[in-house]
Image: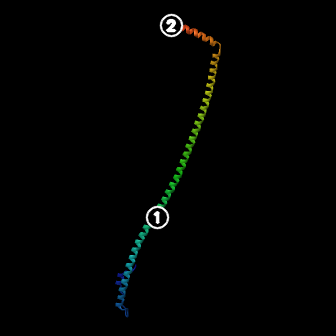
């Protein structure tokens, strides 16, 4: 156990013949006590400073660790955002490609339908034209027959009879 200033002060030496001068020894011991007390005080101050500095160091170490963790978390978050953005952009591109394919397929299907309808209308128009031509030719043939003149004279006589009949009723 270390000596205290009180231990030094209370220390008693045995007396012998032809020993040291007691006053000189006491003065020296008083000086040692003062110096020893000064060293102890300085030591306590240094320990307090060391404790304060250690607390500050611990505080700064904690801040450094927090900052390091924060930087790591921020980096991870940035990486996650970047990866999610890439995935989302790839999904958007795939969706756009699907939509484009669907639109193209719909357009091709409509184009085919229109082409089929157009061809059908052409066929129907050709059939109609052929039938109409046949009808017109048949009518022209009827008009060019000799029977037409007989029909006209018959109609004329019937017309006169009809008029006489109407006049007679009046």
Front tag of 1 and 2 = 2
Q: How many marks?
A: 2
Quarter occupied by residue 137: top right
Q: CA distance from mark 1 to mark 2?
A: 128 Å
Residue annotated with mark 2:
167
Percent across and percent down for residue 116 are 61, 32
- Which residue occupies the foreground of this view, 121 or 93? 121
Instruction: Name the outermost residue toward the bottom.
Output: 18
- Up-down relation of residue 130 to residue 142 (above or below): below
Percent across and percent down for residue 157 are 58, 8
- Which residue occupies the foreground of this view, 167 or 136? 167
Specify whether residue 3 is in view. no
> Taking 19 as reference, is 161 left or right?
right
For the point 61% across and 27% down, the residue is 125
For the point 57% across and 42% down, the residue is 101
Percent across and percent down for residue 136 are 62, 20
Badge 2: residue crowd in 10 Å (few <14, some 14–19, many ≥20): few
SS type, badge 1: helix
Quarter occupied by residue 109: top right
Badge 1: residue crowd in 10 Å (few <14, some 14–19, many ≥20): few
**How is the structure coloured here?**
rainbow
Percent across and percent down for residue 153 are 60, 10
- Which residue occupies the foreground of this view, 70 or 16? 70
Point out the image quarter for the N terminus: bottom left
- Up-down relation of residue 155 to residue 111 (above or below): above
Residue annotated with mark 1:
65
Disc sitting over residue 149 in the figure: none
SS type, badge 2: helix
């Amino acid at each position: 156990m270390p000596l205290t200033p009180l231990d030094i002060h209370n220390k008693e030496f045995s007396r012998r013949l032809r020993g040291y001068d007691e006053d000189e020894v006491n003065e020296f011991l008083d000086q040692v006590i003062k110096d020893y007390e000064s060293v102890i005080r300085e030591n306590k101050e240094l320990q307090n400073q060391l404790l304060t500095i250690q607390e500050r160091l611990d505080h700064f170490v904690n801040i450094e660790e927090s900052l390091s963790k924060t930087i790591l978390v921020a980096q991870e978050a940035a990486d996650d955002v970047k990866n999610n953005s890439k995935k989302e952009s790839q999904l958007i591109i795939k969706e756009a490609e699907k939509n484009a394919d669907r639109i193209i397929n719909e357009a091709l299907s409509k184009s085919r339908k229109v082409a089929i309808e157009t061809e059908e209308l052409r066929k129907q128009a050709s059939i109609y034209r052929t039938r109409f031509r046949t009808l017109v030719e048949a009518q022209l043939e009827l008009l060019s027959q000799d029977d037409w003149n007989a029909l006209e004279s018959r109609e004329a006589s019937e017309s006169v009879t009809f008029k006489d009949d109407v006049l007679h009723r009046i």
